[in-house]
Image (cartoon, grey):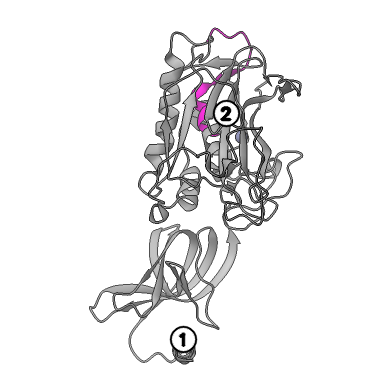
Amino acid sequence: MIALTKMRAVVRVLCLLLVPTVAHAERRMTIVGDVMDTRARWTADGTRIITEATIQTPDGDVVVSQLGGSVGGLGMRTFPGPELLQRGMQVSLDARADHDLSQREHISVDGVRVTGALPGFVRTGPTEAGKYLFWESGCVFVTVDIAGTNQVNGDNEFDTVDAAIAEWNTNVASCSFMQLQQTARLASEVGRDNRNLIKFRDTSWCRPATKDDPARCYSPSAAGITTAVFVDDATSDRDGEIVDADIELNGADFAITNDGQTSGTSSCRSEISNTLTHELGHLLGLEHPCLAGGDPPREDGDGNPVPACSETTDPEILEATMYNFQDCGETKKASLSPDDIDAICQIYPTEQDPGVCAPVGKEDGCCSSSSSPVPSTLLLALGLLFGLGARRRR
Ligand SMILES: [Zn+2]
């Protein structure tokens, strides 16, 4: 009851602000732009949550603040009240410059009109129960198959793998706990074994046959592919958790190329830096930012429908490392775009660091041996092949 009374009091104050007869001098303004970032915090006295948002306008960035938001599992809203600003909104704001008791200036938001949505990153998933995929640990261990590729001089491919891993680690370090860690290289094959493998396939673009399953071959137009194994069980609190992810790079239909150098004979070059940086995004839990032919409808990280690749001209999508297609010899995906970085920082934000960096264990006896029974609480789904398709230049 006390909380309710306070909330009503706040509502009344807000309604008063809507009355045009403002007693003291205020600088009123209309701010039109895109919400690039939001940060909620409690005020120093702990009585209210304030959300500060960075609005990108044609005249530069403006930081505004509004009452309400969510911090540490507690949310605060006024009813009625303006829409809470969220990253990805295109907005027209009714705002005013005002001062706190310490005479610091704030640009306060009184009214929000949402005029559209920016395209956002897309996550992998969801599970049957609607969860998007994630890694539980604060880091992900990856292992490079020791054979590397014969299409590149010496061991140069391994340096490029290191650089692709560093590209993710360095760029997300300021806002995300997530880091990729490499274990020692060894001879290995893809599959559910809690080892996240990076495998070059020089001759056959197939997952090899097993005793009771034939070789599984992939689309020859895919330069790379990532396979994730994750918990797909609505009754499990691990629903959506990735337990294994393997990356394969296609040297059968493409010339695997390192900084322009290859002995591969395919007419279309697949630069390791370009293809692998993209696939590592899949391994971390990211989907493509637009729908290619045959893709099911999806929503992006802001809950907006994902557009068709054929219908978008948005550079945020076309220039993202996670964009679905690459040209022969392309290198631009080796450098992450702001959207790729933002995705990892929203899925794995620093403030939610689990404080643990460990390989996915063989806990519950679930994931280590195909002969051991899978507990009903932890059903695993093998699936979701993510490729990086080729868009061959004519
Ligand atoms: Zn892809």
Q: Which corner quadrant of the image does residue 351 belong to?
A: bottom left
Residue topped by disc 1: 14
Residues 388 and 145: in front is 145
In this rendering, does residue 319 appear at all? no
- Residue 155: x, y in percent? 43, 12
Q: Is residue 251 a member of the stretch shown in magenta?
A: no
Amino acid tagged 2: Ile
Neighbor class of circle 1 (other Cα within 10 Å; few <14, some 14-19, many 20+) is some
Q: Does the image show residue 308?
A: yes
Q: Is residue 97 above or below residue 359?
A: below
Q: Badges 1 and 2: C-beta atoms under 8 Å apart? A: no
Q: Is mark 1 within 8 Å of ligand 1?
A: no
Residue at (71, 19) in percent of width and height: 209
- Circle 2 sits in a helix, a strand or a loop, which is it? strand
Secondary element under disc 1, as helix, strand or loop, is helix
Q: Does the magenta stretch include residue 277?
A: yes
**Three-letter code for the amino acid on which mark 1 is drawn:** Leu
Q: In this view, does 310 lie above or below 8?
A: above
Q: What stretch is highlighted in magenta?
A: 262-278
* Quadrant of the frame with the C terminus: top right
| Residue depicted at x 42% and y 45% | 138
Which residue does the numbered mark 2 point to in the structure image? Answer: 247
The percent coordinates of residue 47 (x first, y second) are 36, 80
Alpha-carbon distance for marks 1 and 2? 53 Å
